[in-house]
Image (cartoon, rainbow, N blue to C red):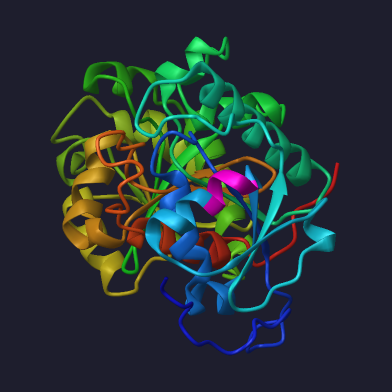
């Protein structure tokens, strides 16, 4: 068995004296690689220096994952975050005890799908009560979720429903640039039609609030245009910037939000990468995703903003083909936890 790497005891507060955020880590689909990436990620010394992670899942499944990985650690069931202790080699688990002992690895299971739903439900309740400051999700399997009778496209929509939020935004975060999207998974023509001043304004506000929560007191936000060169004074397009974006920027600026634009998207990301902007607002999927994947796909994390807390996720699925083999890489979970901590430095507001 491998011993846990030596690390200094985790502190309740960080180097700047701020209270470390409590992050609920949902175990995802227990038949997938979620348990196997959670174990090394939560034992990582950098994770403990940045946040106080508490798993919402099944303790025995995590113990089985630790055995598969050959890792020695102390997996402790707790009633809630208030009972957790944060020391090297210890993993705190709000143990729902939902998975059968003989659940096979790498196989579709309605029981695992229902358990994944329950983990998210409990994490949402903790968030609404102000008991956690952020949520970091291991992958679930949509087919298993649906087989259990929970018909949601994925984590984002499920969390929005459980927290009573009607509209959320996708933010992609890398060490160089953060991008929030006005529209995401729709066709380009549909995206242009859907963009309107109210949606632009709400998206920028969600991004602004997320950055403030992360400790950026007065974020500088660059807002992309829709057309090449942001329309170049009517030369390209049909005046979409003036009708769909500019009115939103005027309202935002009047409220003291430093939102600049519309900016030509072909230079906005370069300027953000060198530090001119804290956040870029992309109008449609590829406008934001393409540059982010060039700048930092290996360290990119998907965030959901507009919820009572920040939610981050790994950039991979359940990987049923390697689940239970000990071959899963934990790097994406480590980064998702790091960015959950970075974006959740302010406590969640209890409802």
Judged left or right of residue 285, residue 141 is right
Judged left or right of residue 146, residue 115 is right
Residue at point 60%, 78% (across, down): 88
Give above or below for 87 relative to 63: below
Residue at point 30%, 62% (across, down): 299
Is 163 included in the stretch rendered in magenta? no
Q: Is residue 35 among the parts visible in the rendering?
A: yes
Judged left or right of residue 286, residue 60 is right
Q: Nearer the viewer, residue 167 or 218?
A: 167
Whole-percent x and y of residue 230?
23, 43
Q: Which residues are magenta?
A: 59-63
Q: Nearer the viewer, residue 2 or 12?
A: 2
Point out the image quarter for the C terminus. Answer: top right
Residue at point 46%, 64% (across, down): 41
Q: Is residue 205 among the parts visible in the rendering?
A: no
Count of numbered badges drawn on the protein? 0
Whole-percent x and y of residue 19?
74, 76
Whole-percent x and y of residue 298?
24, 60
Q: Main secondary structure of the magenta part?
A: helix
Residue at point 46%, 20% (across, down): 109
* Residue 344 placement: quadrant: bottom right
Whole-percent x and y of residue 82?
84, 61
Give above or below for 278 relative to 93: below
Point out the image quarter for the N terminus. Answer: bottom left
Q: Nearer the viewer, residue 259 or 219?
A: 219
């Amino acid at each position: 068995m491998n011993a846990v790497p030596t690390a200094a005891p985790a502190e309740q507060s960080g180097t700047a004296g701020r209270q470390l955020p409590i992050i609920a880590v949902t175990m995802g689909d227990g038949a997938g690689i979620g348990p196997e990436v959670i174990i090394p990620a939560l034992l990582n010394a950098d994770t403990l220096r940045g946040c106080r992670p508490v798993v919402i899942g099944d303790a025995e499944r995590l113990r089985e994952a630790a055995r598969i990985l050959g890792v020695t650690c102390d997996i402790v069931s707790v009633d809630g975050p208030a009972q957790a202790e944060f020391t090297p080699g210890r993993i705190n688990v709000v143990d729902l005890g939902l998975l059968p002992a003989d659940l096979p690895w790498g196989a579709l299971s309605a029981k695992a799908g229902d358990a994944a739903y329950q983990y998210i439900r409990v994490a949402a309740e903790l968030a609404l009560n102000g008991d956690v400051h952020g949520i970091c999700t291991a992958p679930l399997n949509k087919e298993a979720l649906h087989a259990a009778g929970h018909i949601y496209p994925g984590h984002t929509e499920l969390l929005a429903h459980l927290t009573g939020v009607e509209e959320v935004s996708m933010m992609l975060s890398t060490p160089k640039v953060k991008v929030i999207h006005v529209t995401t998974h729709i066709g380009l023509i549909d995206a242009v039609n859907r963009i309107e001043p109210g949606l632009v304004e709400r998206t920028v506000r969600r991004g602004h609030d997320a950055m403030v929560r992360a400790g950026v007191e007065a974020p500088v936000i660059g807002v992309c245009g829709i057309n090449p060169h942001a329309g170049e004074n009517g030369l390209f397009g049909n005046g979409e910037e003036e009708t769909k974006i500019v009115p939103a920027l005027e309202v935002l600026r009047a409220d003291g939000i430093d939102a600049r634009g519309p900016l030509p998207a072909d230079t906005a990301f370069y300027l953000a990468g060198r530090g001119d902007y804290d956040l870029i607002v992309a109008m449609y999927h590829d406008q934001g995703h393409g540059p982010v994947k060039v700048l930092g796909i290996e360290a990119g994390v998907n965030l959901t903003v507009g919820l009572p807390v920040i939610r981050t996720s790994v950039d991979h699925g359940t990987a049923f083909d390697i689940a239970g083999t000990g071959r899963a890489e934990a790097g994406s979970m480590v980064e998702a936890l790091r960015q959950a901590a970075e974006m959740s430095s302010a406590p969640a507001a209890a409802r």
